[in-house]
Image (cartoon, grey):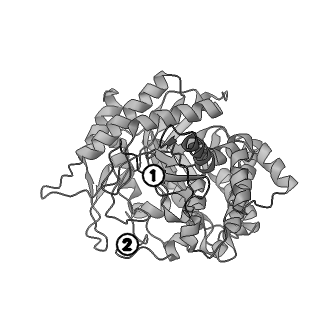
């Protein structure tokens, strides 16, 4: 266990967002374009140009977070608000914005948990090869060095890369077959190296906080007791989960994943210096995003990772194929709900890595409706949170060191694939997919429930 006083505390109850999904102001005050600003969104869904307009309303939002009783707030910094082209001269207005945001959080007694990269690579870097170009590693180091200098005394909890495993696993689908698996896993390797170098740099700077990764972890069950399905689940867990945590915690590639990559002809080029960097840049704690477990069976079909999204439909010929779990209910968007699996996942991560854990996403997306009297009744979200927090507390009672719980999301934001119709927030934002309305904020029933829970500790 890491001996660090800020990792020895009791749990912080918080909530989460990300910059491109909540801030809006996509071209305001010198911000550059990110890949999220220029990409084509699914037909019928909004873009991210306005989002929840948090950039211009953050003081109002933080006042609501304080009223809610949040003890922590996990958010991301937009790389292109700091460095419009990803490199070069910093944007002073962007730097000043996050100082104001951090100062406002401090005044409200809310601990910031800052993600430095949450799916919003600068467009200029992307057009120059993105993560396939090793210069992006250097750019990421320079960007993070600037963040640590500016905010190092104000931020004690840093997260490096949000859901790197999701960016890689859905890569074939994102790129529409334009990139080979080898190219995708080379990019993934460069992210490993970048994360490790930044982690080492943070440690060498003797900053007063801690730093770690934030993958999406979905424990996989074997679909049956057949030995082939047991092995399939083991391969799946290695490929989707432990690959990314082994790299962050131990600086090593998982051996079962290397077997899969060899079969896919996707083993990346790894230099000796890369190996040194990864071993020397190991994390202090683990942050994870959990939504549900998955079930898998042995697979002989022509199914690849491009056939699913991050929570369902993943498969690799000769290794595994995810299948529906008949024992679990689902959300209206088709994601399975498994509170007990949350406890299982926390135990598995704790027993494998022996580090403190921070839950940085966990929530339910739904088509919330605003009533005529400006109320939002979301008992389904209250039930989801209640059941998952119960399992989290059971895991803690059984020895898992969880230091924060930050459900997704603090406020309604633009879902990456479903736009505004899939709402996660505890706070409702009055806008539709394309009609911005007045963007007023309204407290959902789940807001009041979570407020009472934080105040009393009673479910």
Nearest the viewer among 53 and 362 is 362
- Examine the rendering and report whether any part of residue 31 can be seen: no
Residue at 48% across, 57% down: 18
Q: Position of residue 30 (x, y in %)?
A: 55, 73
Task: Please say if 131 is above or below 107.
Answer: below
- As drawn, which residue projects farthest toward the right? 272
The x and y percentages for residue 47 are 41, 72
Q: Quadrant of residue 147?
A: bottom right
Question: Dividing the image into 4 quarters, which one contains the N terminus?
Answer: top right
* Residue displayed at 68% across by 45% down: 248
Instruction: In the rendered structure, find residue 396 and report the number of the disc placed on it.
Output: none
Observer-nearest residue: 92 or 162?
A: 162
> For the residue labelled by badge 2, is the local secondary structure a helix, a strand or a loop?
loop
Q: What residue is drawn where x is 39% and y is 66%? A: 51
Left or right relative to 432: residue 14 = right
* Residue 200 in sight: yes
Q: Is residue 403 above or below residue 89?
A: above
Tell which of 127 and 110 is nearer to you.
Answer: 127
Say which of 70 and 337 sits in front. Answer: 337
Q: Earlier in the sequence, mark 2 or mark 1?
A: 2
Q: CA distance from mark 2 to mark 1?
A: 31 Å
Q: Mark 2 or mark 1, which is nearer to you?
A: 1
Q: Local crowd at mark 2 within 10 Å, few (<14), some, or many (≥20)?
A: many
Which quarter of the picture shows residue 292? top left
* Residue sitting at x 53%, y 31%: 347
Horizontal side of 445 relative to 223 (left or right) equals: left
Query: How many marks do you count on the picture?
Result: 2
Q: Secondary structure at mark 1?
A: strand
| Residue position for label 2 | 46
x then y, percent, for residue 373: 12, 55
**Residue 323 got which mark?**
1
């Amino acid at each position: 266990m890491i001996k660090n006083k800020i990792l020895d505390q009791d749990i912080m109850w918080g909530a989460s967002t990300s910059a491109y999904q909540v801030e809006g102001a996509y071209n305001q005050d010198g911000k550059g374009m990110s890949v999220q600003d220029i990409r084509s969104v699914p037909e019928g869904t909004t873009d991210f140009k306005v989002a929840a307009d948090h950039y211009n309303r953050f003081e109002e939002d933080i006042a609501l977070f304080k009223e809610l009783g949040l003890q922590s707030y996990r958010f991301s910094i937009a790389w292109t608000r700091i460095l419009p082209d990803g490199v070069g001269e910093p944007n002073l207005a962007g730097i000043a914005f996050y100082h104001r945001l951090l100062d406002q959080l401090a005044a409200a007694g809310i601990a910031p948990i800052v993600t430095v990269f949450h799916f919003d690579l600068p467009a200029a870097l992307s057009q120059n090869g993105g993560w396939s170009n090793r210069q992006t590693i250097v750019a990421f180091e320079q960007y993070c060095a600037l963040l640590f200098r500016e905010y190092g005394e104000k931020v004690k909890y840093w997260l490096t890369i949000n859901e790197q495993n999701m960016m890689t696993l859905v890569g074939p689908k994102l790129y529409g077959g334009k990139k080979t698996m080898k190219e995708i896993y080379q990019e993934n390797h460069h992210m490993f190296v970048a994360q490790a170098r930044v982690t080492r740099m943070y440690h060498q700077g003797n900053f007063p906080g801690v730093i770690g990764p934030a993958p999406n972890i979905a424990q996989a069950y074997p679909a049956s007791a057949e030995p082939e399905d047991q092995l399939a689940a083991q391969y799946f867990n290695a490929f989707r989960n432990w690959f990314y945590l082994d790299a962050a915690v131990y600086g090593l590639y998982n051996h079962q994943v290397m077997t899969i990559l060899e079969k896919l002809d996707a083993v990346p080029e790894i230099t000796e210096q890369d190996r040194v960097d990864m071993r020397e840049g190991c994390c202090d704690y683990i942050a994870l995003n959990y939504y549900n477990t998955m079930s898998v069976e042995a697979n002989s079909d022509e199914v690849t990772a491009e056939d699913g999204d991050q929570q369902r439909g993943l498969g690799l010929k000769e290794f595994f194929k995810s299948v529906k779990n008949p024992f679990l209910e689902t959300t209206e968007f088709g994601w399975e709900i498994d509170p007990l699996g949350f406890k299982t996942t926390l135990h598995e991560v704790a027993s494998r890595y022996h580090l403190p854990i921070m839950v940085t996403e966990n929530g339910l997306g739904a088509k919330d409706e605003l009533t005529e009297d400006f109320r939002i009744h979301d008992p389904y979200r209250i039930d989801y949170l209640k059941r998952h927090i119960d399992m989290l507390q059971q895991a803690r009672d059984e020895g898992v060191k969880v230091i924060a719980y930050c459900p997704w999301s603090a406020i309604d934001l633009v879902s990456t694939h479903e736009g505004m119709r899939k709402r996660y927030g505890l706070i409702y934002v009055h806008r539709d997919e394309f009609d911005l309305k007045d963007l007023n904020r309204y407290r959902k029933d789940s807001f009041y429930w979570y407020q009472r829970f934080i105040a009393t500790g009673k479910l």
